[in-house]
Amino acid sequence: MAEINIPFLDLQPIYRASQPGIDAALARVAGSGWFLLGKELSAFEAAYAQQCGAAHGVGLANGLDALHLALLALGVGPGDEVIVPSNTYIATWLAVSQCGATPVPVEPDAATFNLDPARIEAAITPRTKVLLPVHLYGQAADMDAIHAIAAKHGLKVLDDCAQAHAARYKGRAVGSLADVSAWSFYPGKNLGAMGDGGGATTDDAALAERLRVLRNYGSRVKYHNEVKGFNSRLDEIQAAVLAAKLPALEAQTDERRAIAARYLAGLQGLPLQLPHVPDWTEPAWHLFVVRHADRDGLQQRLAAQGIGTLIHYPVPPHLQPAYAELGYAEGDFPIAEAMHREVLSLPLWPGMSEAQIERVIAAVRACA
Ligand SMILES: *Cc1c(COP(=O)(O)O)cnc(C)c1O
């Protein structure tokens, strides 16, 4: 096997782009003697809410907790159902299960890989409480269509924004498009911490307050517990690092868009399905995902040329042993299943060199 000399992802240029601010942030927190629920968190929450065009930001421990606590704050509990995509990272489903509720999968639009609004109504029952679209790979789901269905059936909308930092939908920032939006700041996400991190954005002050209570043992006043809460706080070091990285996010997203444009132009005319971008969405290009009938062969041929790729994701949630309880079988969600057999994510990160971009294009042209 050849040496991988173009990795799937290189986080070092992203660190270097904000290094003075990050290093100062780490030293500042270390010297402050204050590590949880302090002014670094408040400052990042305000800055990130503003970035999203939302009234409130709440820092949480990770993206899974953000989804879980947001569902609890919307009142989801045992016996309820939540509509989720059949093709997503399993965290989207797990958050629903953690509430004692049932994830109800709906197939994606095969072109955009996002929840297909035309299929949602057939999955709604009297138990449905929330629609939970995912802006998969960094491209916004069709939120206006999803809201129209939610309004008709009296449902809430929570969006999983873990892959969509700085993405836009009809000119509006992702993070201001739902009743509440859940974020991950996992290191490999487009805005990544130096460890785990997550959060929520919302215009609803009461909901933001419920999240703040839930993340801190159910208490507003120390040792007074109003509800059975959790320990799910974004710590001061991670908040300070994220705040130091935030000013570079828009430029880094523009760089991702420029690389994606190069790929879209350079990979025309191959037996390969390229990402489809409707004109109302400006993706954040967390991932650049192509589809190929012989995906595994393509991945191996690219590896032989030194190009690292990943599969997002190899097994859909309904076929995971973790969800055996729901009783689904192969064939139940054919669009998701075909995607999982055929998708491949190409290298893409802000700071990728011109030579690296060209080598990826040449290698895919030779291998596809
Ligand atoms: C990363 C991710 C999550 C989970 O975030 P963590 O911070 O790793 O818990 C949830 N949903 C999607 C779509 C993700 O990509």
Image (cartoon, rainbow, N blue to C red):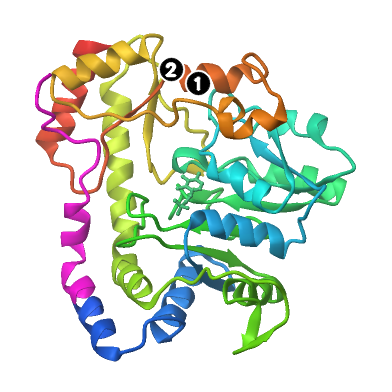
Disc 1 to disc 2, how far (Cα)? 5 Å
Q: Residues within 10 Å of mark 2 (few under 14, many from 20)?
A: many
- Number of marks in the rendered image: 2
For the residue pair 88 and 284, the one nearer the viewer reads as: 88
Q: Using residue 205 as the reference point, say whether residue 141 is left or right of it.
A: left
Residue 248 numbered tag = none
Location of residue 313 in the rendering, given as x and y in whole percent from the top left corner? 45, 30
Residue under the point 21% across and 66% down? 18
User: In the rendered structure, does residue 19 fall within the stretch colored magenta?
Assistant: yes
Location of residue 148 in the rendering, given as x and y in whole percent from the top left corner? 77, 45
Q: Do the residues bearing badges 1 and 2 touch, measured as CB atoms within 8 Å?
A: yes
For the residue pair 219 and 106, the one nearer the viewer reads as: 219
Give SS at disc 2: helix
For the residue pair 312 and 50, the one nearer the viewer reads as: 312
Q: Please identify the quarter of the rendering in which residue 15 is found.
A: bottom left
Q: Please identify the quarter of the rendering in which residue 334 is found.
A: top right
Give SS at disc 1: helix
Cβ of mark 2 under 8 Å from ligand 1: the answer is no
- Residue 174 seen anywhere in this rendered image of the structure: no
206 above or below 90?
below
- Residue 305 seen anywhere in this rendered image of the structure: yes
For the residue pair 177 and 81, the one nearer the viewer reads as: 81
Specify the amino acid type for callout 2: Glu
User: Which residue is disc 1 drawn over?
Assistant: 339
Q: Please identify the quarter of the rendering in which residue 186 is found.
A: bottom left
Specify the amino acid type for callout 1: Met
User: Which residue is disc 2 drawn over?
Assistant: 342
Q: Using residue 61 as the reference point, say whether residue 158 is left or right of it.
A: right
Which segment did they paint magenta? 1-23
Residue under the point 65% across and 71% down? 229
